[in-house]
Image: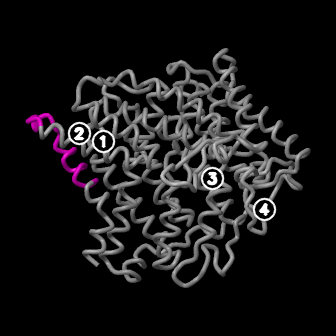
Amino acid sequence: MDSFFNISARGSTVSREIRGGFVTFFTMAYIVVLNPIILGQALDVDGNSITGGAQADFAQIAAVTALVAGVLTILMGVVANYPLALATGLGLNAFVAFGVASQMTWADAMGLVVLEGLIILLLVLTGFRRAVFTAVPPQMKTAISVGIGLFIALIGLVDAGFVRRTDTPPVPVQLGIGGFLSGWPVLVFVLGLLLMIVLYAKRVKGAILISIIATTILAIIVEAVAKIGPTVGANGAFNPKGWNLNVPAWPDSLVDTPNFSLLGNFSLFGSFEAVGFVTAALLVFTLLLADFFDTMGTMTAIGAEAGLLDKDGTPPGTQRILIVDSLAAAAGGAASVSSNTSYIESASGVGEGARTGLASVVTGLLFLLTTVFAPIVTIIPNEAAVPALVVVGFLMMAQVKNIDWDDMEIAIPAFLTIILMPFTYSITVGIGAGFIAYVILKAARGKVAQIHPLLWVVAALFVVYFTIDPISRWIT
């Protein structure tokens, strides 16, 4: 095992890899619950849910979501030997549900996802995707890592209810409710975060995993005593002081029989007949660009945190990582759970010490177990898991010192990359703005020869990406 995964060579141990795999699973297991909520709420053009009929079967979507995530994450570990986990991409699933399926049947929509994945795979096999990655200046790759660090820290704070939207313009966000921390779940998050920080600062082995387990136990006790309930009740009632997503309570049953009927429910070219070639092509382009650069940013950030990047900021086995990720996009569509992609939450496992694909194998096996033991996942509330994202965000932020802030041709693009990821809640937007600014600044200062030809192509594609709505309206 040590030889196959290069565990010792990367300065790790089997126990650290296993702990890292567990931590990554705990910080991203929410997707098994959240993906059914997102996909299950939307109806296609015929008024049908993704599982058929007017009401979606959430358990069925959850089972397939866990199955695909498990298989692909194990594949990433075995084939690419990289501590990177995959699952249905958030944002992409919402776009498919509300922006694509509303125009066609679910089978047609998932066919578009499969098509997008196959196109990305072709770009990988021809070397184009890796060539683009190699063309990016090392300091811009660092900026991507830092931006993602801020992004995942914000995800953790928002998911915990520590930071919330405000209904008082022009202020977009605020602390807690009305500018104050309120509710037991937020207190549980704060205590979990403080415990994790202290244990990590004291270099306690398994600090992140210990904190998640301890905070989950605390959350179960708090719920048993205070009877807080979820943020959104069964009758649709809203409780701002409730638990976000999972209510921490021991389930009635630990085992459930999975239903995998969604597998293979897609039509590869049905969308072109449903909405026409131009519209279908624009939808594929939007999915493709988001998938293409999200993974580039994620694998760079993970590699930087794990100390696996070479002098050019490139992780080991880049081609294999990209091949597995491309297959994941197509596999997610073929399984009708939307495009699967690399998860930045993998950084939490790296923060626990993971450096090899063994951690991914552990995470994948836990996802596979979830298809049967799905009720166990509902025990862990977001408030207990997301402190890991805040801590890892801090670790990734530390790389900002490697950017030359006196060089405006790098500093301004890097700044835009870093701030726009959390401010727009999108890795792709941050990367796109940074690339466009880099090309424009180099050209404006008469240094066109320093711009890699592929960066001209990428910048042009991002211009199209940012103006896709008016272009779509004009063409159609």
The residue labelled by disc 4 is 257
The residue labelled by disc 1 is 434
The amino acid sitting under disc 1 is Gly
The residue labelled by disc 2 is 438
Local secondary structure at mark 3: helix
Residue 457 part of the magenta segment: yes
What residue is shown at x 29% (from left), y 61% (from top)?
A: 467
Among all residues in the image, which is located at the extreme right? 225
What residue is shown at x 46% (from left), y 70% (from top)?
A: 99
The amino acid sitting under disc 4 is Thr
Magenta range is 445-462
Q: Earlier in the sequence, mark 2 or mark 4?
A: 4
Q: Nearer the viewer, residue 344 or 323?
A: 344
Q: Is residue 83 visible?
A: yes
The amino acid sitting under disc 3 is Ile
Report how far apart the C-alphas of labels 2 and 1 lie in the structure: 6 Å
Local secondary structure at mark 4: loop
Q: For the C terminus, which image quadrant?
A: bottom left
Disc 1 or disc 4, which is closer to the eye?
Answer: 1
From the viewer's perspective, is 186 left or right of 65?
Answer: right
From the viewer's perspective, is 405 left or right of 454?
Answer: right
Name the disc covering residue 31, or none.
Answer: 3
Disc 3 or disc 1, which is closer to the eye?
Answer: 1
Look at the numbered discs 2 and 1 and tell me whether their residues touch, using CB distance below 8 Å.
Answer: yes
Q: Earlier in the sequence, mark 4 or mark 3?
A: 3
Q: State the image coordinates of residue 423 (x, y, percent, origin top left).
A: 45, 45
Look at the numbered discs 2 and 4 and tell me whether their residues touch, using CB distance below 8 Å.
Answer: no
